Image: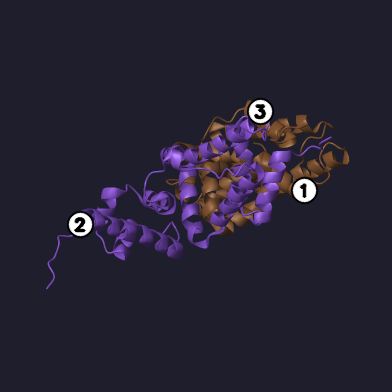
Chain colours: A purple, B brown
Amino acid sequence: MNRRTPPDPSRRSERSRRAILDAALELVAETGYAKLTIEAIAARAGVGKQTIYRWWPSKAAVLFEATVLDRAGGEALDPAAVELPDTGDLEADLKTVLRATVDELNDARLNEPMRALTAETVNDEAFGTAFTEKVLEPQLQAYVRRLRAAQEAGQLDPGVDPRTALELLVGPLFHRWHNRTLPLTHAYADAIVDLALRGLTPRP
Amino acid sequence: MNRRTPPDPSRRSERSRRAILDAALELVAETGYAKLTIEAIAARAGVGKQTIYRWWPSKAAVLFEATVLDRAGGEALDPAAVELPDTGDLEADLKTVLRATVDELNDARLNEPMRALTAETVNDEAFGTAFTEKVLEPQLQAYVRRLRAAQEAGQLDPGVDPRTALELLVGPLFHRWHNRTLPLTHAYADAIVDLALRGLTPRP
């Protein structure tokens, strides 16, 4: 018989955390957000309801971690850790990033939880404000840093405010995803970058 | 005694319709969308529940009409009736339209129902697709027509696809409204028009 070591509580916690997040993602894909309950997540994950409530205040918070935070390794997003590529070619880097965003928005496994989260952020001001501050704005600030670097390299008009300019890049993608107007493709991501960089009016 | 004329059924219907829409707007502002019920709307409007269900399938549909359709006179949006101004000055016309959109998004009376509707369109694919087809896309096609006219007038690059280009104008405003990142102002609307028309990269 091997000597048993006592279970590592942090490892056990991480296993439960992972099981809860996976259960939430599975269930929301199966039943939709409206029918998702903490009870069902607990049952699927094999934990008690109280375990979930100890860590998260709501089903929205569980999905928030499962879809967004967890992809940053389970940590709250560290603003400095979110960086856009900088190869020195602004156009190419923005196309890389916007194509990756298109892929995420088209990911069937993420679609339902992202829509549920989006509905919560629209409707619930406190939750939405926290989401924007902790998750969205750090990502937008990565655009600001990349656009500032492009200004220093002479690739971006020095009179342009990067914080406003980035919305021309991300706004269209989310508008199309959100409203299901037309397909989200890599060609579309490229077109948005081209239009944003070169503008709509004729160049002399 | 005056001779009584029989009540005009269409006028009576319009009175009930108006009372129901007003009740829905008042209640959603008072209690929020989650607590809004058809029963409460009926009680406030002084009509029976069945009157509401005869005309609308859900509370989302009532609000949809109260916030969007009703502003077009209670009719479904006629695509040809939605037109952007055309003074011959593309920049000025777009600033007029985007400033008006900012005013709508900042309208406290419309904010709660618009957020409720937005959450429904994000989450409910059937409702969202119908909303996009019947309400959103006709408005976007008005942008397409205005941008095409600008192309004919030499004010817009002939190589630009108007259906894609318009998303650079509307996407940023809704991104900011939706995520509550920064204030929606007329100066912001103007900045978006300027950036979209002239582009982010330096002009020679």
Q: Residue B161, which numbered label?
A: 1
Residue at 29%, 56% in the rendered image:
A14
Q: Which is in the foreground here, disc 3 or disc 1?
A: 3
Residue at 68%, 55% in the rendered image:
A187
Count neighbours of disc 1 (C-alpha within 10 A) and say few if under 14, some if 14 to 19, many if 20 or more. some
- Which residue is labeled 3 in the image? A158
Three-letter code, disc 1? Asp
Q: Tell me residue B52's x, y (percent).
A: 54, 52
Choose top left, top right, bottom left or bottom right for residue A126: top left
Q: Tell me residue B149's x, y (percent).
A: 84, 41
Three-letter code, disc 3? Pro
Choose top left, top right, bottom left or bottom right for residue B72: top right
Secondary element under disc 1, as helix, strand or loop, is loop
**Mark earlier in primary sequence (3, 2):** 2
Co-location on one chain, circles 3 and 2: yes
Co-location on one chain, circles 3 and 1: no
Residue at 36%, 62% in the rendered image:
A23
- Which residue is labeled 2 in the image? A8
Q: How far apart are the two marked residues, 1 and 2, measured between alpha carbons? A: 59 Å
